[in-house]
C-alpha cells in the first residue's frame, strides 16, 4: 500500500505535469515561448500564495471567526496542548477559540513558532479528556509535518494552472493566435484549458486528504491511543452532520479535523477529507498493533522544558 508521503509526492508529480502543459500553452500563445508562460503563471501564483503563507495564521483566524485566548481562559485545552507539544518536538502553540456550537478543531501557522491550535466551544463540551487529547494530537501532527507549507505549495501550483488557462482563454476569445507558430489541435486545447484547472483542484484536494490520513496516523502513534481518535471522529462526524457550521468560508474546510460545512453541496462533492468510516477503520486496525500501544517519548525541545509554553 502506498503511504501518505509517497502518495503526496505522486500527486505533486501530477500537478506539476498539468502546470507544464498549461504553462507551455500560455507561453506559446502570448509570448512565443513555453518557458516564458511557465514563469509568468508561476510568478502570479507565487505572489498571492506567499502572502497567504506568511499571514496564514491571521487570515485563517479571521475567516473562521476564531480569536486568540490566554491559557487561563481555556485551562483544559491549554493543559492538553502543553502536555502533548513536547511529544511532537514542538513548543506549545498559541490557542484560539471559535464561538461556535459545532464541535471541531484546526491548526494553522507555517511553523511551530507561528502555530495556532484552535477549538470550537462545541468540541470542548462534546469530547471527554481522552478524546480531546487525541484530537489535539492530530492537530499537532499537522504542525510537526509543516502541512501548511505543503498545502501552500499545492495551492501555488494549482493557482498557476488556473491563471495560465484563463490567460490563454482570454487571448483566444479576443482573436489571438499562437505566436509560436504551432498549430495546436483545438480539441486538445479545449480539454487542456478546461480540464487542467479542474484536475489541479482535484489533485490539491487529494493532497489534503493524504495529509489528513497522515495526521491521523502520526497523532495516534505519538500518544499511543488510536481508539481515542476513532471515538472522537465518530462523535464529531455525527455532530457536524446534524449541526454544520453556518459561518466561515468553505475554502477553509481542509483545515478542520472533520468537514464542518455539510450544508454546502460543493463541499460534499469535492471532499477535503477521507471518508470518516475509512479513517475510523484504519485507526481501529492500528489499535490492534502492538507498535501503537506505547506512546512515543518526548524529544527535547531546545530552550523549552516539557510542559512549558513556547517563549513569548
Image: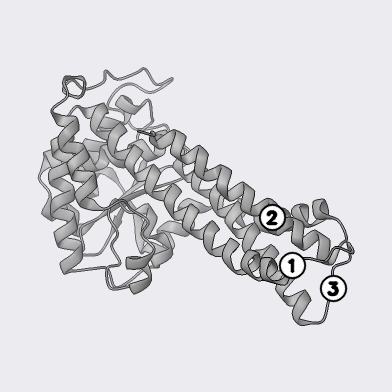
Reading the image, the residue beneath label 3 is 177
The tag earlier along the polypeptide, 3 or 1, is 3
For the C terminus, which image quadrant? top left
Residue under numbered circle 2:
21
Residue 161 located left or right of residue 70: right
- Mark sitting on residue 185: 1
Query: Picture quarter containing residue 185?
Result: bottom right
Measure the C-alpha gap from mark 2 to mark 3. 17 Å
Q: Please tell me which of labels 2 and 3 falls first in the chain.
A: 2
In this rendering, which labeled residue sits more in front, label 3 or label 1? 1
Question: Residue 52: x and y, percent?
Answer: 56, 54
State the image coordinates of residue 180 (x, y, percent, origin top left).
88, 61
Q: Position of residue 15 (x, y in %)?
A: 57, 50
- In the image: residue 244, left or right of residue 267: left
Viewer-nearest of labels 1 and 2? 1
Specify whether residue 119 is in view: no
Circle 3 SS class: loop
Amino acid at each position: 500500500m502506498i503511504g501518505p508521503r509517497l502518495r503526496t509526492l505522486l500527486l505533486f508529480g501530477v500537478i506539476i505535469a498539468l502546470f507544464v502543459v498549461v504553462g507551455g500553452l500560455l507561453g506559446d500563445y502570448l509570448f512565443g515561448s513555453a518557458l516564458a508562460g511557465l514563469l509568468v503563471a508561476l510568478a502570479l501564483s507565487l505572489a498571492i500564495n506567499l502572502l497567504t503563507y506568511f499571514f496564514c495564521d491571521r487570515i485563517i483566524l479571521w475567516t473562521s471567526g476564531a480569536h486568540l485566548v490566554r491559557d487561563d481562559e481555556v485551562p483544559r485545552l491549554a493543559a492538553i496542548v502543553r502536555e502533548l507539544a513536547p511529544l511532537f518536538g514542538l513548543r506549545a502553540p498559541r490557542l484560539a477559540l471559535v464561538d461556535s456550537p459545532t464541535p471541531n478543531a484546526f491548526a494553522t501557522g507555517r511553523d511551530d513558532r507561528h502555530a495556532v491550535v484552535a477549538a470550537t466551544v462545541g468540541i470542548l463540551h462534546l469530547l471527554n479528556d481522552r478524546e480531546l487529547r487525541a484530537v489535539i494530537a492530530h492537530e499537532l501532527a499537522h504542525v510537526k509535518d509543516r502541512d501548511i507549507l505543503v498545502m501552500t505549495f499545492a495551492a501555488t501550483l494549482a493557482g498557476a494552472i488556473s491563471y495560465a488557462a484563463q490567460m490563454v482563454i482570454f487571448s483566444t476569445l479576443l482573436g489571438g493566435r499562437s505566436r509560436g507558430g504551432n498549430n495546436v489541435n483545438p480539441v486538445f486545447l479545449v480539454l487542456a484549458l478546461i480540464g487542467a484547472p479542474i484536475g489541479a483542484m482535484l489533485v490539491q484536494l487529494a493532497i489534503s486528504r493524504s495529509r489528513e490520513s497522515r495526521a491521523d496516523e502520526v497523532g495516534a502513534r505519538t500518544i499511543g491511543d488510536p481508539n481515542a481518535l476513532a471515538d472522537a471522529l465518530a462523535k464529531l462526524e455525527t455532530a457536524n452532520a446534524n449541526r454544520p457550521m453556518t459561518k466561515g468560508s468553505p475554502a477553509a474546510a481542509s483545515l478542520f479535523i472533520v468537514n464542518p460545512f455539510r450544508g454546502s453541496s460543493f463541499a460534499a462533492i469535492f471532499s477535503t477529507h477521507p471518508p470518516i468510516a475509512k479513517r475510523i477503520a484504519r485507526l481501529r486496525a492500528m489499535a490492534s498493533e502492538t507498535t501503537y500501544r506505547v506512546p512515543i517519548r518526548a524529544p527535547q525541545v531546545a530552550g523549552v522544558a516539557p510542559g512549558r509554553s513556547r517563549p513569548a
